[in-house]
């Protein structure tokens, strides 16, 4: 579909952002749904997010994805937040609702959907371990607790950060040491370990075993050191592309009011990764 004067615009703000798969994923979704929308990437320097949001209002942009380092700093420019975004103090999707810009967090819901639809896994009653205590980890911790996990173990090098993150999980949140991973049904790596240029597994590989599902939120490279170590121990291990696609699907629905065409979005993301896009 060619761009017209009536084409509606959405985009992603971040720094850096030129590597983002979001334009590929969302433009595939718009095309599949037959919507006259387009999605672009906006390089916004650290500290400039409030101004970027003000510009988006003035330009009539209908939706924004928000990535690092802006997930917290955009809050001051928004009219209100969803309950989940309020708890997390962070936003990864902004939707125009009438005259308001509303901040949402779709990362946690994206993981839960990826677990359900892609892996057939439900956190309810399970022991889950999350490695890391940053923004992505906190979204995951809250989502797992809300999904009924029996326990959410938070493992982080800085105990104080782990304690703060564990509070999001309420009574099921536990600050743990690495050895507790052995007891986990689900392990989520929410640290940069395994990214390009960082090939160290997120935890001691001897802690993995065959009765576990391991999710590495890193999606480039597709086969991280953590995934390789988990698979070598017999665990079922996957990367973060599923969460990326499913959180984008939630954003798509917030913006358009339509169900997201997940197969088209997933196929576009996989094709882009296969061609070296990150």
Image (cartoon, rainbow, N blue to C red):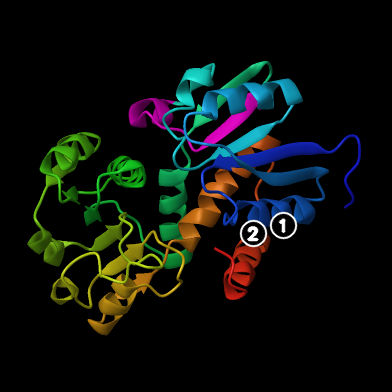
Residue 208 lies in quadrant: bottom left
Residue 180 lies in quadrant: bottom left
Q: Residue at x 69, y 39 (%)?
A: 10
**Rendering coords of residue 188 (x, y %):** 30, 58
CA distance separating discs 1 and 2: 6 Å
Q: Is residue 84 magenta?
A: yes
Q: Which quadrant, please, contains the C terminus?
A: bottom right
In the picture, measured across the screen, residue 179 lies left or right of residue 13, that is left
Which residue in the protein does label 1 denote? 28
Residue sitting nearer the eye, 256 or 91: 91
Q: Is residue 193 magenta?
A: no
**Rendering coords of residue 191 (x, y %):** 30, 55
Residue sitting nearer the eye, 233 or 172: 233
Label 2 near label 1: C-beta < 8 Å? yes
> Residues in magenta?
83-96
Q: Which mark sits nearer the N-terminus, 1 or 2?
A: 1
**Rendering coords of residue 140 (x, y %):** 34, 47
Which residue in the protein does label 2 denote? 265
Asked if residue 257 shows in the view, the reply is no
């Amino acid at each position: 579909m060619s761009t017209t004067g009536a084409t509606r615009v959405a985009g992603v703000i971040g720094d850096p952002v030129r590597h983002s798969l979001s334009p590929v994923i969302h433009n595939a979704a718009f095309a599949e749904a037959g919507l006259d929308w387009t999605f672009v990437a906006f390089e916004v320097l650290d500290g400039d997010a409030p101004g970027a949001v003000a510009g988006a209002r003035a330009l009539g942009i209908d939706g924004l994805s928000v990535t690092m380092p802006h997930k917290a700093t955009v809050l001051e420019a928004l009219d209100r937040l969803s309950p989940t975004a309020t708890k997390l103090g962070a936003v990864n999707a902004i939707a125009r609702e009438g005259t308001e810009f509303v901040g949402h967090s779709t990362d946690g819901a994206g993981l839960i959907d990826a677990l359900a639809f892609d892996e057939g896994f439900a956190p309810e009653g399970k022991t889950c371990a999350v490695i890391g205590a940053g923004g992505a980890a906190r979204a995951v911790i809250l989502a797992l607790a809300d999904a009924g996990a029996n326990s959410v173990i938070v493992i982080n090098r800085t105990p104080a950060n782990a304690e703060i993150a564990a509070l999001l999980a309420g009574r099921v949140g536990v600050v743990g040491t690495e050895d507790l991973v052995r007891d986990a049904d689900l392990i989520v790596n929410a640290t940069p370990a395994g990214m390009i240029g960082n090939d160290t597994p997120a935890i001691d590989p001897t802690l993995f075993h065959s009765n576990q599902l391991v999710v590495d939120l890193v999606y480039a490279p597709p086969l991280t050191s953590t995934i390789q170590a988990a698979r070598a121990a017999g665990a079922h291990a996957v990367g973060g592309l599923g969460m990326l696609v499913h959180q984008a699907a939630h954003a798509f629905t917030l913006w358009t009011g339509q169900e997201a065409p997940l197969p088209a979005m997933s196929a576009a993301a996989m094709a882009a990764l296969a061609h070296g896009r990150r």
